[in-house]
């Protein structure tokens, strides 16, 4: 028991002795050299810069694709509208023809001459 | 490297220099080692995990840099100990209380001599222990299992005690 206590005391004394080692501070010229090394270090790359190239590529694709998509959409819409108008006119004419018989030219008011 | 991280890293320059000084044994080489450590830290800043111990990370870089740059000179006597020309002057060591610091200087020199007589690995683990790193962090610095750190530290401290007993005789 005493032996282990003495052992601990010796270890503590040894640690205290080691703490009395000469304090070797870095010379001022070394501090200046280190400061220069740290100052010359390149600035850290921002994280958003890693995504810059993909983002620019995506923006370019969108910029190029948008006019094409808009053109295709408007052309198709215009064609559909034209087709609807033509169909509506045709329907209208058929209805008008069905409700109003064709006028037949006659020589006088009492004689009707069939045209067929 | 982020500005805040650089500022925090600069705050560890004394600790890094201390370890570098005890590893290389020479002032000039220690300065080069520390500068190279920071250069490598800047280059590999992306490898640092935020929220972990920055000092331990820097120690690891310093140790690996030392191994790659200086270990081949281990046979050189200057590397195994502090050479006389680089020994700090008494003005560097003395502080407020001259007499007390004078006594502390003598003791510190003996401890320093004992520390420098240890192997490089033993010296490193003792110095890292003084930096208040946990055993897990020391294991990360030394790139070995925690159990190895414990046994290496115990052996290093035992060797240090033997050296100090020799000086006391």
Image: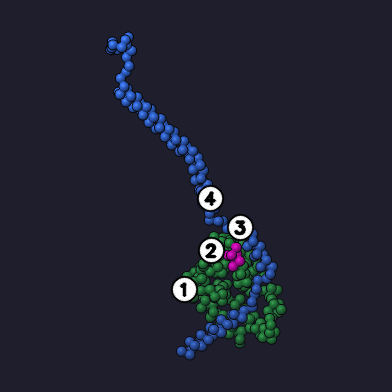
Chain colours: A blue, B green
Circles 3 and 4: CB distance less than 8 Å? Answer: no
* Identity of the residue drawn at 51% across and 48% down: A55
Say the numbered circle drawn on residue A24: none
Residue B66 visible at all = no
> Which chain is indicated by disc 3?
A
Query: Could you classify mark 2 by the number of other residues whose Cα lies within 10 Å: few (under 14), some (14-19), or many (20 or more)?
Result: some
2 and 1 marks on the same chain: yes
* In the depicted structure, whether residue A65 falls above or below residue B18: above
- Magenta part of the chain: B3-9
1 and 3 marks on the same chain: no
4 and 1 marks on the same chain: no
* Identity of the residue drawn at 68% across and 71% down: A27
The nearer-to-camera label among 3 and 4 is 4
Residue matched to label 3: A42
Residue matched to label 2: B48
The nearer-to-camera label among 4 and 1 is 4
Say the numbered circle drawn on residue B147: 1
Query: Could you classify mark 4 by the number of other residues whose Cα lies within 10 Å: few (under 14), some (14-19), or many (20 or more)?
Result: few
* In the depicted structure, whether residue B33 falls above or below residue B168: above
Residue A73 visible at all = yes
Measure the alpha-carbon separation of dots 2 and 1: 24 Å
Measure the alpha-carbon separation of dots 1 and 3: 39 Å
Q: Earlier in the sequence, mark 2 or mark 1?
A: 2
Q: Earlier in the sequence, mark 3 or mark 4?
A: 3
Residue matched to label 4: A52
Measure the alpha-carbon separation of dots 4 and 1: 47 Å
Quarter of the image with the C terminus of chain B in it = bottom right
> Which chain is indicated by disc 4?
A
Question: For residue A105: magenta?
Answer: no
């Amino acid at each position: 028991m005493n032996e282990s206590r003495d052992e601990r005391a010796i270890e503590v004394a040894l640690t205290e002795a080691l703490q009395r080692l000469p304090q070797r501070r870095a010379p001022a010229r070394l501090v200046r050299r280190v400061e220069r090394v740290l100052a010359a270090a390149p600035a850290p790359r921002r994280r958003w810069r890693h995504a810059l190239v993909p983002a620019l590529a995506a923006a370019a694709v969108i910029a190029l694709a948008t006019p094409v998509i808009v053109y295709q959409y408007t052309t198709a819409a215009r064609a559909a509208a034209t087709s609807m108008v033509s169909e509506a006119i045709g329907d209208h004419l058929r209805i008008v023809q069905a409700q109003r018989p064709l006028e037949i030219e006659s020589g006088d008011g009492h004689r009707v001459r069939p045209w067929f | 490297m982020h500005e805040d991280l650089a500022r925090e890293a600069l705050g560890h320059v004394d600790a890094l220099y201390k370890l570098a000084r005890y590893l290389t044994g020479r002032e000039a080489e220690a300065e080069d080692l520390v500068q190279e450590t920071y250069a490598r830290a800047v280059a590999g800043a992306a490898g640092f995990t935020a929220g972990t111990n920055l000092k331990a990370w820097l120690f690891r870089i310093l140790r690996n840099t030392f191994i790659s740059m200086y270990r081949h000179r281990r046979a050189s006597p200057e590397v195994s100990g502090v050479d006389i020309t680089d020994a700090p002057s008494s003005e560097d060591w003395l502080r407020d209380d001259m007499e007390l610091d004078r006594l502390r200087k003598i003791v510190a020199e003996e401890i320093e001599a004992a520390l420098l007589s240890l192997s490089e690995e033993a010296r490193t683990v003792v110095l890292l222990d003084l930096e208040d790193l946990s055993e897990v962090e020391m294991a990360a610095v030394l790139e070995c299992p925690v159990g190895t750190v414990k046994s290496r530290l115990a052996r290093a401290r035992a060797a240090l005690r033997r050296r100090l007993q020799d000086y006391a005789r």
